[in-house]
Structure formats: C-alpha cells, structure tokens
Image: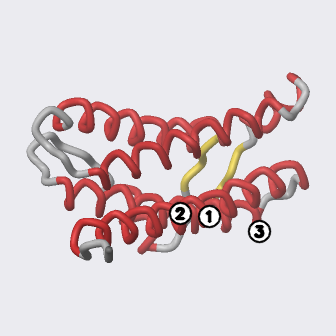
Amino acid sequence: MSYKQVHEILDQSRTLHEDLGDYYEAVRQTSEDERLNFLLNSIRQRDEYVETLLEGYDPKEREGLLNYYFQFAPDQQISQELRSAKIERSMTVDEVIEVVLTYERGIEALYRQFAESANSPRVQEFFGSLASAKEFQGRMFSWDVLEHDQSQTIPERN
C-alpha cells in the first residue's frame, strides 16, 4: 500500500506539466506543430482550475484538504501510466503528446478513485471536480487537434 497526501499528488502533476512547458520552449523554435501548443494551453487551464478550486476553500479547509492522506493501491494500469510519464527533449512531438495524454487519462482515473474512496465529503467533491475537469479538457484537446489536423489536410471550398 502507498500513502500520499493530496498536495503530493497535485505536485506530481505540476512537475509533468512543467516538463511539458520546458519541452515546448525547447522545440517551439524548430517545430510548427500546433498540437503541442493546444496541449500546453489545455494543461495550463487545468492547473489554473486546480488553483481556482483550492481558492474556493477557506485557508484552514484548504490546508486540511492538501494534507489529507490517502491509503491506496491504484490498479496496475493506472500505476504504470503514472510511473512511465517522463518527457525528454529527444522525444518527438507525437511521443510527448502520447505520454501526456496517457498520464492525463491515468490521473483522471486516479482522481475518480479518490473521489469514490475518500472519507471526507470535501475531498470527494474536490477530486470529483478535478476528474470531471480532466475529462472535459481531454475532449477539448482532442477536438482542437482534430480540427487542426483537418485544416491542414482539407482545402477550403471557395
């Protein structure tokens, strides 16, 4: 069994998002791939949502939420998705997108598990909101990428 506090789980996501930002800055001079920009914007919106959600709690509640301990053993697939989420500068844009999307699906599933297993209604609410936001953002990113890919391959009608 593993023990983690809420703030450690959120910090893990922030670290991956920072790595994505670093990767984007390193390759944006040489890559015209807008999918990376869409992904980065989606991640930034998610991070802003987490901060906004946390600001909705009074300081004492926020501290209690962030220090809440989970005793959990996420299923094997989720554990593997979260452990394998590493971004390296040598990766292609497609590889980076796959790593981030796999991680985001894993963390969404983990957030759902947390929402279902927490003893605190506030923690349930918090992680339920995060899971729903992740699902929505994943759909928006997919839609942006699909729209971008179609605009690149389908000429406009006159």
Q: As displayed, is residue 90 above or below residue 75?
A: above
What is the three-letter code of the residue carrying label 1?
Phe
Mark 1, mark 3: which one is toward the viewer? 1
State which quadrant residue 56 falls in: top right
Report which residue position mark 3 lands on.
116
Q: Is residue 69 left or right of residue 34?
A: right
Which mark is nearer the camera, 1 or 2? Answer: 2
Marks 3 and 2, how far apart at CA: 25 Å
Name which residue lies at 38% across and 33% down.
18
Task: Answer whether labels 1 and 3 touch (C-beta < 8 Å).
Answer: no
Residue 49 versus residue 109: which sits nearer the camera? 49
Left/right of residue 37 with respect to residue 44 in the rendered view: left
Nearest to N terminus: mark 3 or mark 2: 3
Determine the residue positioned at 85% across, 57% down: 119
From the image, tell me which residue sits under label 1.
Answer: 136
Give the percent coordinates (x, y) of residue 146. 38, 71
Q: Which residue is mark 2?
A: 140
Identity, as a three-letter code, of the amino acid under mark 3:
Glu
* Along the line of sight, the residue nearer the viewer: 140 or 92: 140
Alpha-carbon span between mark 1 and mark 2: 6 Å
Contact, CB < 8 Å: mark 3 with mark 2? no
**Residues marked 1 and 2 touching at CB (< 8 Å):** yes
Q: Secondary structure at mark 1?
A: helix
Task: Look at the picture and state if 72 lies above or below 36.
Answer: below
Say if 28 sits above or below 104 in the image. above
Q: Decide if residue 136 is on the left or right side of residue 146.
A: right
Residue 103 screen position, x and y as percent: 41, 59
Amino acid on which disc 2 is placed: Met
Circle 3 residues within 10 Å: few <14, some 14–19, many ≥20? some
